[in-house]
Image (cartoon, rainbow, N blue to C red):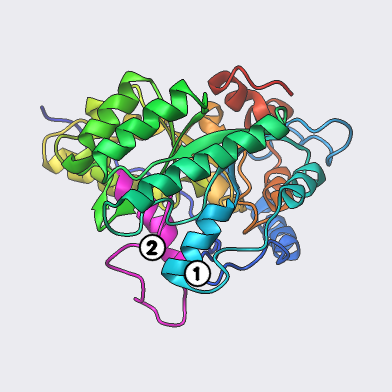
Amino acid sequence: MTMTYKRKTLLCGCAGCGPMGGFASAAVSRRSFLAGSAAVGLGMTGLGTAGLGTATAQPSGKPHRVDVHHHIVPPAQRQMNIERQGGKGGPAWSVQMSLDDMDKAGVAYSITSILNPGPWYGKIEESSRRLARECNDYAAKLRSDHPNRFGIFAAIAPVDVEGSLKEIEYAYGTLKADGIALWTSYNGMYLGNETFVPVLEELNRRKAVVYVHPTTAECCGKVVGAVPPSAIEYATDTTRTVASLIFEKPRSAVKFPDIRWIWSHSGGTIPFLTSRFTRLAWERKMDDPVPIMQKHFYEIAQGNTPGQLAALMKLVSISQVMFGSDYPFREAKEALDGMLAYKFSAAEQTAIDNGNALKMFPHIKI
């Protein structure tokens, strides 16, 4: 088919992504920076929905937010990271630390996911399957111990198709997981690669929620030696995997429309590159991919500066935006402060705080 190409003008802004390399702790706060950038941003015009209403007050009373980007560090993964990668195996973390940070930002419920690189260390092996199972069981025990505070995005390694299909069955059938956690790429393959089709087919059949976290691209871990890949490449890797799902055969974003995707960090660089995607689709006589991206969901961890939120709100409606913290690499209060500074209307903020998440996960009681 043919289509009329329309260039979209998006406001842009950027912020560094959380340092997975080095495993910096959440004690590092950017609140003073956010306050300054928010002051600049609110003086601009055209900031999406900014100025439509007033934000609600700072956290008080009963926690009510739902965090869809909250990491835990199961002992099995910490040990595996030490064995495979060295160092401390992850940031300082405990259950109580998570609960304390949630309370400071009024977060009632966090759906947990494990750290990079998930249960995947470069090849199909029994240890990877065992790690996925142990981490998922740990998350289930955490939920059992704190049933009104934690949920589960179960870990799988989709390169291992057989192991992943078994773990998906276990995650949904036994653990009653909220969804599945994936990473943007595995061994240089993005999620639109045909290798992942059997796994995506099963997730589509289940109408699964799939939360996707970026990782270091195989191509680009040391492009700028003085800058860790998390600062630039994570946001870009999210865009790469979305492009893969849209453009790589079999075009899984179209083939599997019932998967409910959640993209990290306000979509990374997706909002800034939509016109390029539209142009590429036009050149290939494909439908405009923007409506596909507008059906997906986006959480605001490390994507909550005025420019980032403005760009996201030019791409999607408020119904597609969720709260995320990226704890323990960032404090939940950081995401809250950025959201409040943007001055969403009360109704819009409620949608981000919990409204959209409760529609997706109606079993959550807060």
> Is residue 288 visible from the viewing direction of this image?
no
Mark 2 element type: loop
Residue reaching furthest right? 61
- Give the camera-side residue of 84 and 22: 84
Q: Position of residue 173 (x, y in %)?
A: 45, 21
Query: In this figure, which residue is indicated by the disc labeled 2?
Result: 216
Residue at the spot 67% in from the left edge and 60% down from the top edge: 37
Q: Residues within 10 Å of mark 2 (few under 14, many from 20)?
A: many
Chain part drawn in magenta: 213-242
> Disc 1 marks which amino acid?
Gly
Instruction: Place residue 220 in its image quadrant.
Output: bottom left
Q: Position of residue 62 (x, y in %)?
A: 85, 30
Mark 1 element type: loop
Q: In what quadrant of the picture does the N terminus appear?
A: top left
> Disc 2 marks which amino acid?
Thr
Name the mark on residue 21. Answer: 1
